[in-house]
Amino acid sequence: MTAVALTDVRALYARPLLDLVFDAASVHRAHHDPREVQLCTLLSIKTGGCPEDCAYCPQAARYDTGLNKELLLQVDQVLQAADRAKAAGSTRFCMGAAWREVQDGRGFDRVLDMARGVKALGLEVCCTLGMVNAEQARRLKDAGVYAYNHNLDTSREHYDDIITTRTYDDRLNTLRAVADAGISVCCGGIIGMGETVEDRIGLLWQLTNLNPQPESVPINALVPVAGTPLADQPKIDPLEWVRTIAVARILMPRAMVRLSAGRMDIPESAQAVAFLAGANSIFTGDKLLTTANPDFDFDKQLLDKLGLHGRAAYKNETNEPAAAGGACGTKTGGACGCASAAAA
Ligand code: SAM
Ligand code: DTB
Ligand code: SF4
């Protein structure tokens, strides 16, 4: 894989927004069915009381956010939620735990049972449990975990302003363990945390140069939660959010680009433009892990209005999307990885 230069990401990010959206839409259409949106459902399987200091997070024990802590759920509670998610049309089910890292023992064994049960329902199983080592990643894979979410969150330069209790390299080591175990890497970040444009570019550059590139890229807009250090951050401009999504789509043409946290504050019209600019996955259901998300009816109406529909589970296993080698026809200077674009 040839590394994409930081200067190329900078140049892409600086382009006129409508040119960027147009090219991102072209890249999207060359690599994916543009009518298809992957519907994912989140469940917090262990809530709050986390020892980490992530400045955005309502689940960090050190911030008084008024959150009700919950111990690790039972397997049957999780499978009931997964069943409901499936009935509502979701094809990926993501279980999140407020852990710094996975610890071997009965809790992890229970999570493996949850994974086996969710997989048996025919859903793509995703977990986000904090740091994992190679052996833990292998056990997750054996239990049927399809994707593991572990975000870089921001640029390497901005990272220490957001988290001090683990390093950027710790995150990269977990991503390595996940990829080496044959699990799809889901890795993205958060915008709206007071970062500079250069930090956003730095995050996109890091994600693009992961080897392999992430199979899915969650783009979160900060949900400012009272009690966290980032509670008073101003809302991001929805068009800056669209710009980030368009650049992610061009740089990572085969990834699922997911509209993640923050949609409650993004107007419907901007969400529509984000789909045009290559977003092709959302979290559905009125709760993310602990904060609010648009409800089922809002999303159903939005998708209906836009002529979009859900994507089947395990589609990549059976029906690889078009254009290995690419043919997107854009002038992205080859940044999108398409042979034709490089020649353009
Ligand atoms: N504890 C695990 C970890 O940190 O990897 C898994 C759960 S953690 C809540 C998953 C991700 O949610 C974080 O990496 C962050 O990107 C996102 N997140 C958490 N709080 C958020 C907030 N207030 N706004 C936007 N994204 C948030
Ligand atoms: C991701 O990038 N965003 C999701 C999922 N991965 C786990 C989590 C968003 C959490 C938002 C804050 C909350 O609801 O607690
Ligand atoms: Fe803990 Fe994850 Fe929240 Fe950080 S983001 S405080 S690791 S739950």
Image (cartoon, rainbow, N blue to C red):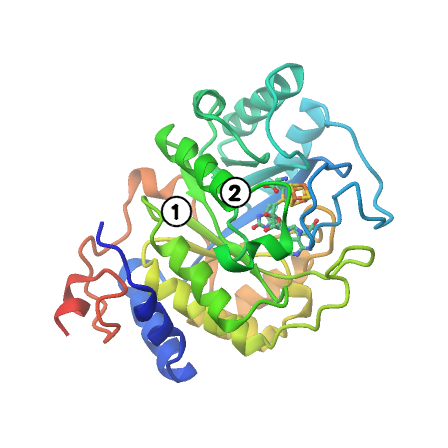
Q: CA distance from mark 1 to mark 2?
A: 12 Å
Coordinates of residue 301 in the picture (x, y in percent): 60, 66
Instruction: Find numbered disc 1 in the image and state the secondary structure of the residue it sits on.
Output: loop
Circle on res. 150: 2
Specify whether residue 169 is in view: yes
- Is the CB of mark 2 within 8 Å of ligand 1? yes
Would you identify the image quadrant in which residue 142 lies?
top left
Coordinates of residue 182 in the picture (x, y in percent): 36, 31
The residue sitting at 79% across, 40% down in the picture is: 61
Image side of residue 141 versus residue 131, left or right = left
Say which quadrant the C terminus sits in: bottom left
For residue 75, above or below residue 83:
above
Coordinates of residue 104 in the picture (x, y in percent): 59, 17
For residue 9, above or below residue 116:
below
Residue receiving disc 1:
215
Would you identify the image quadrant in which residue 266 lies?
bottom right
For residue 223, above or below residue 198:
above
Specify whether residue 283 is in view: no
Coordinates of residue 296 in the picture (x, y in percent): 66, 56
Instruction: Find numbered disc 2 in the image and state the secondary structure of the residue it sits on.
Output: loop
Picture mark count: 2
The three-letter code of the residue at mark 2 reads His
The residue sitting at 77% across, 62% down in the picture is: 231
Image side of residue 115 versus residue 265, left or right = left
The three-letter code of the residue at mark 1 reads Glu
Circle on res. 114: none
